[in-house]
Image (cartoon, grey):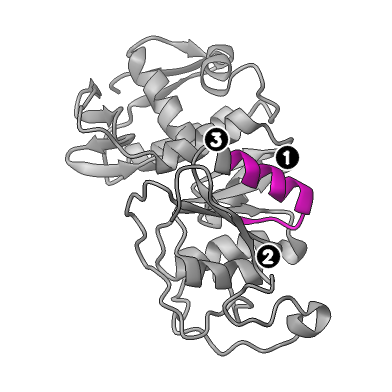
């Protein structure tokens, strides 16, 4: 793997690729790829006649192993942005591979088995969303991060429905991006620190929640929002307080993003008939308390 931080960046289509053919432009784009061995099951977000099938793939269905020098696959058509992200990741100790489109990204994932995939939603023909959807349809639990130019309610919903774990809002900012990558890829320590509210437990080490023994996986922002609520139990928190403490001064999205996150957090935390814990205080904000 090489020593920390000195790994090179691979780009799909270079002469050093496994098949030795490189990127053949329009001609290569028209080559037909055999049908994938991973058929897409019935889904509420189906992708008929997938355009990203894997030939003879050994694509990992559950890629959860922690690698001290993990690969991050960047599916980004903007070469300058991809190179900048790659350089920042390498400086932080990660290996990178760049794919310029969704199809080559899918094929690279089957060969490389990366620890994380970062996909630009702006890829042509909504293929960024379709690529995320196909990873999930194949059963993969690999962390998926979407790059988005804006954050409307529809954008956020589309991100979640496509199966992405999180999204990163442009313009690109190095520290914010690396913070998100570390959240999903840093090894967890053995020490345990928890917040508790009734039967709801938030593990600050594994960044997961439990309620009545049921494990709840959280995205980065869902974790930070729940942590803030659980750090102030029974205290009414205004929307301004939540925006400042969870999103920070550089928040550039729509003001109703809080409602969107609260909605999805409730779906996870209050599933299976559990009592509501996240209460709305109309005209003010939210509070964590028993019904």
The mark lying in front, picked from 1 and 3, is: 3
> In the structure shown, which secondary structural element does the residue marked by tag 3 occupy?
helix
Viewer-side residue, 138 vs 86? 86
Q: Position of residue 152 (x, y in %)?
A: 69, 39
Is 11 on the left or on the right of 195, as rendered?
right
- Which residue occupies 63% across, 47% down? 86
Residue most extreme to the right: 26
Q: Badge 3: few (under 14), some or many (20 or more) residues near its Cα, within 10 Å?
A: some
Q: Position of residue 255 (x, y in %)?
A: 66, 25
Is the magenta region chiefly helix, strand or loop? helix
Viewer-side residue, 62 vs 211? 62
First in sequence: mark 1 vs mark 2: 2
In the rendered view, would you say 237 is above or below 27?
above
Can the viewer see residue 123 in this picture? yes
- Range covered by the magenta-colored residues: 74-89
> In the structure shown, which secondary structural element does the residue marked by tag 2 occupy?
helix
Real-space Cα separation, disc 1 to disc 3, in angstroms: 19 Å
The mark lying in front, picked from 2 and 3, is: 3
In the rendered view, would you say 276 is above or below 78?
above
Is 167 on the left or on the right of 24, as rendered?
left
The residue that label 1 is drawn on is 150
State the image quarter where residue 234 is shown: top left
- Which residue occupies 69% across, 55% down? 76
The residue that label 2 is drawn on is 127
Residue 261: in magenta span: no
The residue that label 3 is drawn on is 178
Viewer-side residue, 8 vs 167? 8
- Which residue occupies 60% across, 78% down? 50
């Amino acid at each position: 793997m090489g020593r920390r931080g000195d790994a090179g960046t691979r780009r799909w289509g270079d002469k050093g690729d496994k098949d030795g053919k490189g990127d053949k432009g329009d001609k290569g784009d028209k080559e037909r790829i055999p049908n994938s061995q991973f058929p897409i099951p019935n889904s509420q977000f189906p992708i008929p006649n997938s355009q990203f099938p894997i030939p003879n793939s050994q694509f990992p269905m559950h890629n959860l192993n922690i690698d001290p020098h993990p690969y991050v696959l960047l599916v980004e058509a903007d070469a300058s942005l991809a190179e900048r992200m790659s350089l920042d990741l390498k400086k932080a100790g990660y290996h990178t591979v760049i794919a310029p489109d969704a199809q080559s990204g899918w094929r690279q994932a089957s060969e490389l088995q990366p620890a994380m995939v970062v996909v630009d939603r702006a890829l042509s023909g909504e293929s960024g969303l379709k690529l995320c959807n196909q990873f999930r349809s194949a059963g993969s639990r690999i962390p998926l991060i979407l790059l988005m130019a804006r954050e409307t309610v529809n954008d956020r919903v589309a991100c979640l429905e496509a199966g992405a774990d999180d999204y990163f809002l442009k313009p690109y900012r190095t520290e914010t991006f690396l913070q998100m990558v570390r959240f999903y890829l840093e090894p967890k320590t053995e020490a345990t620190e928890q917040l508790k509210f009734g039967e709801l437990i938030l593990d600050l080490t594994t960044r997961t929640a439990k309620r009545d023994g049921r494990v709840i996986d959280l995205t980065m922002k869902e974790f930070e929002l729940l942590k803030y609520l659980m750090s102030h139990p029974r205290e009414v928190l205004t929307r301004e307080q939540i925006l400042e403490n969870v999103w920070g001064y550089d928040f550039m999205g729509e003001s109703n993003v809080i409602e969107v996150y609260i909605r999805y957090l409730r779906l996870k935390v209050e599933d299976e008939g559990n009592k509501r814990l996240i209460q709305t205080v109309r005209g003010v904000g939210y509070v964590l308390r028993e019904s």
